Image (cartoon, rainbow, N blue to C red):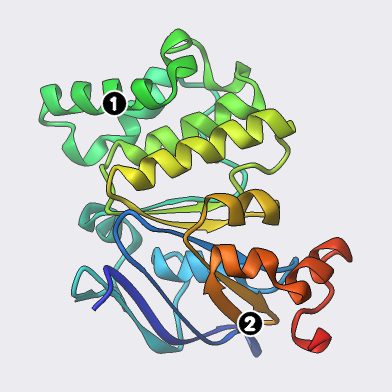
Amino acid sequence: MALLEVRDLHVFYGNVEALKGISLQAEPSQIVAILGGNGAGKSTTLRTISGLQRARTGTITFDGKSLVGIQAHTIVSMGLSHVPEGRRIFNILTVEENLALGGYLIRSDRSLVKERKEAVYGLFPRLAERRTQLAGTLSGGEQQMLAIGRAMMSDPKVLMLDEPSLGLAPMLSKSVLKTVREIANRGAAVLLVEQNARQALAIADYAYVIEVGRIVLEAKAAELAKDERVQKAYLGGFESVASSG
């Protein structure tokens, strides 16, 4: 069984079915990209896995345990962290204080909190330079680094990232995603929802394409990057992979 395994997930918002039988999986040290247009169901997939949204039917298994019905904070303590779109950092707290909140579950072990902070600063040296600065005064790229760093404070086995490069300059976007690759290389499984398909497929091992709540394509990332349907859909604004062949 995979480290994270999602099977036949159906999620509703009222009477509207947002996910129509999603199935996917991720292994340690693997980046799994989830691609699709706006409203396809990418964020809903991550929110359901992390316990922020409830599934009507389907199974979610993490490290051999079912996550169905488990509260979000308990899922974090089990080793699964979610960085939502929009970063959601605490603007009026410093970088150091934001990271401390990320280590809330281990707050009684000060040496471990310090060790994890130093590991985050190793990943993102720019945060180390700004550790006493208010998070709200950081640049967009630095705020994204902080959001990822805060999630890494719980030393997750699975890290889920929702649009980490959104709004970032191309060079900074590439830098953030390079660090995501490094996080996976250290052993974590990464689920990556990313608007920049080329960059996502360049660092991912495997990828799924979602359209209107269904997975319409899946393959190794390198294979999908060469797929004419995917190339055409991205060049045209991700209109539809399914209808293009």
Residue lying at 38% horizontally and 58% vertically, measured from the top left = 30
- Kind of residue at badge 2: Gly
Q: Position of residue 173 (x, y in %)?
A: 64, 36
Quadrant showing the C terminus: bottom right
Residue lying at 35% horizontally and 61% vertically, measured from the top left = 72
Label 2 residue SS = loop
Q: Is residue 14 above or below residue 131?
A: below
Residue 131, labelled with which disc? none
Res. 107 in view: yes
Q: Position of residue 114 (x, y in %)?
A: 21, 21
Label 1 residue SS = helix
Q: Is residue 76 left or right of residue 43?
A: left
Mark 1 or mark 2, which is nearer to you? 1
Q: Is residue 54 left or right of residue 208?
A: left
Q: Position of residue 223 (x, y in %)?
A: 59, 69
Q: Nearer the viewer, residue 222 or 173?
A: 222
Q: Nearer the viewer, residue 127 or 71?
A: 127
Q: Is residue 149 above or below residue 203?
A: above
Q: Is residue 88 left or right of residue 153?
A: right
Q: Nearer the viewer, residue 104 or 129?
A: 129
Residue 213, labelled with which disc? 2
Which of the two labelled residues, at mark 1 and mark 2, occupies the earlier sequence position?
Answer: 1
Q: Is residue 211 above or below residue 235?
A: below
- Kind of residue at badge 1: Ala
Residue 119, labelled with which disc? 1
